[in-house]
Amino acid sequence: MPDIIQLLPDNIANQIAAGEVIQRPSSAVKELLENAVDAGADEIRLLINDAGKALVQVIDNGQGMSETDARMAFERHATSKIKNIDDLFRIRTMGFRGEALASIAAVAQVELKTRRSEDEAGIYLEIENSVVRKQEPVAMSVGTSIAMKNLFFNVPARRNFLKTNASELRHIVDEFIRVAMSFPDIFFSLESNGQQVFHLEKGSLKQRIVQILGNSYNAKLVSVQEQTDYMNVFGFVGKPETAKKTRGDQYLFVNNRFIKSAYLNHAVMNAFAEMIPKDSFPMYALFIDLDPSQLDINVHPTKQEIKFEDEKIVYAFVQSAVKHALAQFSVTPTLDFDLDASIQSLDAVSKPFTSDKQSSAASSSLFNTFTKKNQSHFIESRSELKHWKDFYEKETPQQEQSGQQAPIPTLTPENQRLQNGPVFQLNNSFIVLPTRQGYLLIHQQNAHERILYERFNKAVAGKPIATQQSLFPATMELSPADAVLLTELIPDLNLLGYQLEPFGNNSFVIQGTPADVEQGNEKTAIERLLDQYKHFSNDLKFNKREKLLRALTLQQSVKAGVVLSEKELQSLTAELFQCATPNITANGKPTYLEFYKEELDKLFGK
């Protein structure tokens, strides 16, 4: 039997290694930007074509490379940053793995131009499939330009797994933001298909955060600054009122390297405890400066997950620093004096207090009891107060006739138990619906989520929702990252009743919205939709369209605590039992529970 174990050819070995490093265009963006930072550049430009599938190019004014270094940079395990094993635990630079350029050259066509200040001419290299195809001198300014073209041209199966251009561009923007936020003293720009997405001038960290996340944060950032011999923490957190329903605007850096840490995120969330709602997430951009020997950044290939020598100290220090910053700047939740929509719909607010009602109220014993001094012992007993609603509940005949009851239709066999009768709201969150055998307790938000989810599903399946044209089209400006996201969603949003048009420079014109979006509220509705969508962005089991449907469902559903009129209760109940799956939400939560008379009797010993 011949020997069957053999060494792989270099080009195949490189392609296998590349699979770990270069998973998509954004992977190359991260590695190339970090190399440019390490080269000492203070101006870095990123050019993208076809969401990085056709071109990823990084141009910097760093120190450049010699001819020998330019050739060596594409060899596997070639690096200028590690000399011995101890250096792995003293890393302060960014891209250090020694495989990034070799991996890129294994799965793309690469063009490199580089020149040092002491050299009269630069060097130009063309590399394809890990092989140098051309090498010649070139006239250029000091620095490096590296272009990665036709990613995965030689691995078509990998190319087929790439997502849509809009989706891949979003990943590129994410990586760009993470590097650009780490180094506010470096100029960064990003162009996609010839259009500028980011132009970030050198400045302070606060200026860089506002440039990236938007002007809305300009007056709403709180500085965090704590120093000890062991570690330093600095950066900014958003004031409590900037908290959102998604954790999108959260950035954590260790020694200027972006990391993901649920543990340290928990520390920040704890610092905000009782200042923001439990289902909200604060904005933060925090930088931890720590002796590299106290951490291990080689836990994950992308180095976004790290281990600390003593994570409890780091946790306590981060939490304390954020708490101290919030206390020092006297940040407390602002009181909202705007009337809640459910309060504004109450009779006492919405109906005019006519002269008849004023005189009726003034003459009532209840009014007199509270307007006389020292009369608390004269407050009437409960039985005498039973008609306290009378003076504002009297309606005109026209008003009485307008509130007609809609009968609940007999629908599926399961729901033939339903009988026509009164439907009422409990705790402004539940609907009680009598049945022949007992009653149904319906959760109003869950029920509305099911109704909307099926309505939206029908819309994207070929029955578009009608659009209400705006009399005065509104223009909204988004952060570059959100603008990329919204562009990706526009085709599906058109089917769901939204009519949006790009207006250049990260702005959009809202020409129309679904009929149930209140005029004047279009911008808020779309901004909340994007926040909700980003909440699902890390859930791999949902495709883009499913994430959008679920986000829109959650955003538009009537929330628990909202007062509903009897007509609204009847309508919501009727629509629920016309659904194909009326008993659960898309997330698997029950929409109603059924209680039987026999069970109720047993509870009372009958």
Image (cartoon, grey):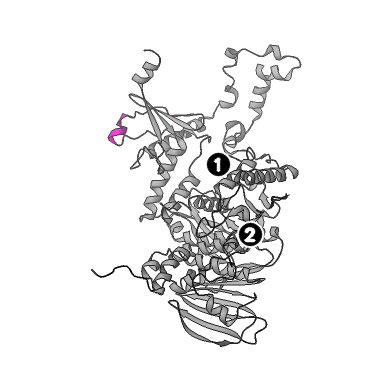
Q: In this view, does 401 lie above or below 99?
A: above
Q: Can residue 96 be seen in this view?
A: yes
On whether residue 420 falls in the magenta region, the answer is: yes
Q: Position of residue 544 (x, y in %)?
A: 43, 56
Q: Name the residue under label 2.
A: 256
Q: Can residue 251 be seen in this view?
A: no
Judged from the image, the secondary structure of the residue bearing numbered disc 1 is loop
Residue 74: numbered disc: none
Q: Nearer the viewer, residue 299 or 419?
A: 299
Query: What is the count of numbered marks?
Result: 2
In which quadrant will I find the N terminus? bottom left
Q: Which of labels 1 and 2 is toward the front?
A: 2
Q: Please name the predominant secondary structure of the magenta segment in the image.
A: loop
Q: Position of residue 606 (x, y in %)?
A: 36, 12
Amino acid on which the number 2 mark rests in the picture: Asn
Residue farthest left in this picture = 1
Q: Position of residue 553 (x, y in %)?
A: 46, 46
Tell me where residue 131 sits by quadrant: bottom left
Q: Which of 584 and 238 is in front in this view?
A: 238
Amino acid on which the number 1 mark rests in the picture: Asp
Report the span colored magenta: 406-425
Q: Mark 1 points at which residue?
A: 279
At x 62%, y 57%, the residue is 213
Task: State left or right for residue 341 relative to residue 161.
Answer: right
On whether residue 201 falls in the magenta region, the answer is: no
Q: In this view, does 18 lie above or below 287?
A: below
Other-residue count near label 2 (Cα within 10 Å), few / some / many at <14 / 14–19 / ≥20: some
Spatial distance from mark 1 to mark 2, Cα to Cα?
A: 29 Å
Label 1 close to label 2 by CB (< 8 Å): no
Q: Where is residue 325 in the image (x, y as percent from the top left)?
A: 72, 46
